[in-house]
């Protein structure tokens, strides 16, 4: 039978302490404003910095970039507590970097990691992952956005839609097709595009 105990055996005292801290943050900084934010269709950018001040944006990230290398249960607790509050959409937005930054962490240069990751983890900058397109949802292998090399940069053409934090992101990790002759997943790359790049519209 499923054990719905509030203290699962895999939760350490540190996990419980984190959950209690998180509940206090949600109770004071989010729940009183949920209805107004839902009506407005947005929430203050300052909330990212408040969450970062408690270490919520750096969970699982290396210390050298401002993160805290903890186990996955911290993210599980984070998702559960936001879900309990009825503010799952806010949690998805605040944590949009958790799907946007892994490609940079895995394949980016050290210079790029040092420039991008610390301000995202501190809440000063916002990151988003752009995959979904109007033509095919999250059909990554069928995406149509292209990136053609031109000297020392790429020229990107395409559309993305339903991008969590996309309207306010400073950095957009974007799925593009760098090999137009390869129509499958083999022709797809990830580009980090800065939000103020000329020609980018939202």
Image (spheres, rainbow, N blue to C red):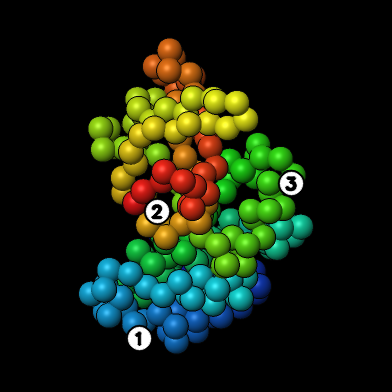
The first of marks 1 and 2 along the sequence is 1
In the image, 60 versus 16, the foreground residue is 60
Q: Position of residue 192 (x, y in %)?
A: 54, 42
What residue is shown with label 2? 166
Q: Nearer the viewer, mark 1 or mark 3?
A: 3
Q: Position of residue 14 (x, y in %)?
A: 66, 72
Q: CA distance from mark 1 to mark 2?
A: 25 Å
What residue is shown with label 3? 111
Q: Residue at x 42, y 65 (%)?
A: 91
Label disc, if present, on residue 122 of the rendered structure: none
How crowded pointer 3 is (Cα within 10 Å; few <14, some 14-19, many 20+) is rated as: few
Vertical side of 155 occupied by 198: above or below: below
Q: CA distance from mark 1 to mark 3?
A: 40 Å
User: Is residue 4 in view from this perspective?
Assistant: no
Q: Position of residue 3 (x, y in %)?
A: 44, 63
The first of marks 1 and 3 along the sequence is 1
Do tag 1 and tag 3 residues touch (Cβ < 8 Å)? no
How crowded pointer 1 is (Cα within 10 Å; few <14, some 14-19, many 20+) is rated as: few
Label disc, if present, on residue 32 of the rendered structure: 1
How crowded pointer 2 is (Cα within 10 Å; few <14, some 14-19, many 20+) is rated as: many
């Amino acid at each position: 039978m499923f054990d719905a105990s509030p203290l699962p055996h895999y939760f350490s005292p540190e996990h419980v302490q984190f959950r209690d801290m998180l509940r206090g943050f949600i109770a004071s900084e989010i729940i009183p404003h949920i209805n107004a934010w839902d009506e407005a269709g947005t929430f203050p950018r300052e909330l990212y910095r408040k969450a970062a001040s408690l270490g919520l944006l750096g969970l699982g990230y290396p210390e050298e970039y401002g993160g805290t290398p903890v186990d996955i249960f911290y993210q599980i607790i984070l998702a559960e507590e936001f879900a309990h509050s009825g503010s799952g959409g806010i949690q998805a937005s605040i944590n949009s970097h958790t799907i946007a930054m892994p490609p940079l962490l895995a394949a980016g240069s050290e210079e790029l990691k040092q420039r991008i990751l610390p301000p995202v983890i501190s809440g000063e900058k916002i990151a988003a992952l752009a995959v979904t397109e109007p033509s095919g949802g999250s059909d990554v292998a069928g995406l149509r956005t292209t990136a053609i090399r031109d000297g020392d940069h790429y020229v990107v053409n395409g559309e993305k839609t339903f991008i969590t934090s996309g309207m306010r992101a400073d950095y957009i990790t974007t799925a593009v097709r760098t090999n137009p002759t390869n129509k499958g997943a083999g022709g797809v790359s990830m580009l980090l595009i800065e939000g103020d790049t000329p020609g980018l519209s939202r």
